[in-house]
Amino acid sequence: MSYYGVRRDANSGMFATRFFFKVIKEYFEKVLRLTSEMIFEPAFSVTDVEKEKKIIYEEINRSNDRSFNKLMIEIDKVMYPNSYINNKTLGEKETIEKFDAEMIRAFKEKFYKPENMVISVSGDITFKKAEKLIDKYFASLFVCENESKIIKENIEPNIKEKYVIVDKAMERSIVAIRIKTPKLADDNFPATKFYNFILGRGQNSRLFNRLREKKGYVYSTGSSLLANHRFGFLTIDAQVHSSKIKDVLKEIKNVLSDLARKKISEKELYRIKNQFKSNLLFLKEASTFQKCLDNVNELSMEGFIRNEEYWLNEINSVTAEQIEEIAKQIYNEKDFVVGAIGKDINIKDLKAFK
């Protein structure tokens, strides 16, 4: 594809494998045809498979060097012990060593079918033309055995141990808390997004102001929200010296308590709504490629797309009372795991967060 000046990439995540292509307008159909051939008719030669194994081994080595990723894997193991969530996307070296071309070909035949695919196109092309070409090189070439469907099963935490330590020599330790939250389709999910923004997004967040600016305990801190129709959880993290982990966890608990006890002001809510709207509109303008990826993610995971109008309506409808209710729910949530990675970490310090 380099002959046509294509920029391409691919990645495998928790729920799907994604292929990305950027190409100038006049070569769109040629690249779409080549993409179809690549996905549905791969060679899987022995040489290529063995070469790819070595690449994956190196990716696993790099992943193991990323301390935060390593900690999250261990937290997932105890929070969702019987779920695919705690499976490593890259796999284990021992498993990959057993792969051969026939195994990979069988996997492709089982899952790489039109009914399992979502295709998103963004750029200087009409919907009608894109639909016609996609039908020509994808849908019309293969018979769908089943209608595509979105799996709606819930994944609930099954926590036996709330505290996890990963021993690793590091200049700064990392401490993280993962807490169950509403799922994407829940009515109160928009308020959960606002809560996450107030709690730990940026230098105006409650966590940053308390832990770094006021106390000086941490190098960095923040929160993130991951949710779909299967599960939802909030992750709070901080880089900190191991001697300060206990103090940091106590302060995080205090921040959560403050949000649960005191409703945010209308002035703060107004500011946050404007930041949400700006982020949403800036993202829309910044990258048609990113929009393409967002469409694929939402269609494959949810079965429909939440467009800008949907989110603007959701933003406008969120109230301070709804955010306060979410804050109380998260503060009182019993499904949580606390973990830390570093040297000389005492499990008694982790239990400061209860």
Image (spheres, rainbow, N blue to C red):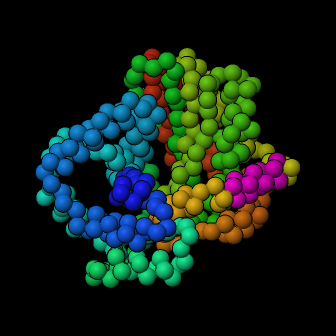
Frontmost residue, 97 versus 338: 97
Q: 52 or 277: which is nearer to us?
A: 52
State the image coordinates of residue 218 (x, y, percent, origin top left). Answer: 62, 24
Height in image: 184 above or below 14?
below
The answer to whether residue 111 is seen in the rendering is no
Quadrant assignment for the N terminus: bottom left
Question: For the magenta stretch, what is the residue range?
Answer: 268-282
> Is 222 contained in the magenta span?
no
Instruction: Identify which residue is drawn at 75% across, 51% down.
Output: 275
Left or right: 175 in relation to 221: left
Which quadrant of the structure image shows residue 222? top right
Left or right: 195, with 301 as reference point: right
Task: From the top left corner, tell me how far across and down residue 280 is, in percent.
Answer: 68, 58
Residue pictured at 59% horizontal, 57% vertical: 287
Q: Is residue 140 visible?
A: yes
Q: Does 186 sit left or right of 145 as displayed? A: right
